[in-house]
Amino acid sequence: MPSAATLALLKTHVLQLLENTAGSVWGTVALEDAIGYALNEYSNVRPLQTTTALALTAASREVALTTLTGLLTIDRVWFPYTATSPEYPPNWIEFDMWWSAGTPTLYLKIDSLPTIGQVARIFWFKVHTLNGLDGASATTFDPNINHILISLAAGRVAYSHAATLVITGQMNKSQATQMYGWGITLINDFRAKFGLPPLKTPGFSVMM
């Protein structure tokens, strides 16, 4: 069952972790950017798998994938596919995928040229969504991922904005250095959990 988390809920918990429940230090933009960052980082290691039956609008082996919102990569392609009477065994085919000017394109490696109206069933991986973030109306990740995203988002905020707190007079350099290091630690805890190399960052003095 997907989590019941919303953007508002995660923002509240991130501020609690940052010990700034009133939101007087970090603004809405910084928090939402950090939560979006956390969601994208999680999606890269544990993407959401879904399927789409896509009817071809042209007699071409090249198929535009503009309707696959949040596409990361394609897993498998079944072509041709008949929803009312699925073929057995499935017609798994070879394919290529590339991006051109930000638009993903699927290339069907088949002998015969497809015809308009034929359907490709595409198994693909996409970015998770969070209710309230970037216009999403549903949350797709499991409830046990909530704390992971909260921690990673808090780390992103702390790491990214520690220097700004010194420049704007909201924190002295010693406090901000600790905040910077704590942020990196939270990010690297996430990366270690999923077998990723640690984040390489400049020292805080360089950031200043």
Image (cartoon, grey):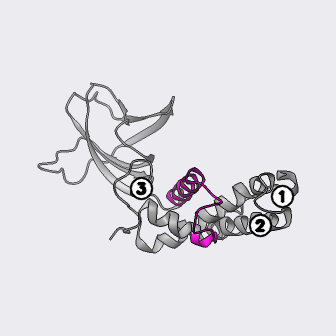
Q: Is residue 94 above or below residue 141?
A: above
Q: Is residue 97 left or right of residue 156?
A: left
Q: Which mark is residue 129?
A: 3
Marks 1 and 3: in contact by CB < 8 Å?
Answer: no
Q: Secondary structure at mark 3?
A: loop
Amino acid tagged 2: Gly
Residue furthest to the top in view is: 59
Tell me whether circle 1 and circle 2 mark residues in contact (CB < 8 Å). Answer: yes
Residue type of the residue flagged with mark 3: Thr
Q: Amino acid at mark 1?
A: Phe
Q: Residues within 10 Å of mark 1 (few under 14, many from 20)?
A: some
Determine the CA span between mark 3 and mark 2: 29 Å
Q: How many numbered tags mark residues here?
A: 3
**Which residue is at the far bottom?**
144
Magenta-tinted stretch: 16-43
**Left or right placement of residue 208 versus residue 74 in this view:** right
- Tell me which numbered mark, 1 or 2, is placed earlier along the sequence: 2
Query: Closer to us: mark 3 or mark 1?
Result: 1
User: What mark, if any, has residue 181 been given in the picture?
Assistant: 2
Q: Which of 136/18 is in front?
A: 18
Report if residue 51 lies within the magenta region: no
Q: Is residue 74 left or right of residue 38?
A: left
Q: Is residue 142 above or below residue 95?
A: below
Compute the Cα span from label 1 to label 2: 8 Å
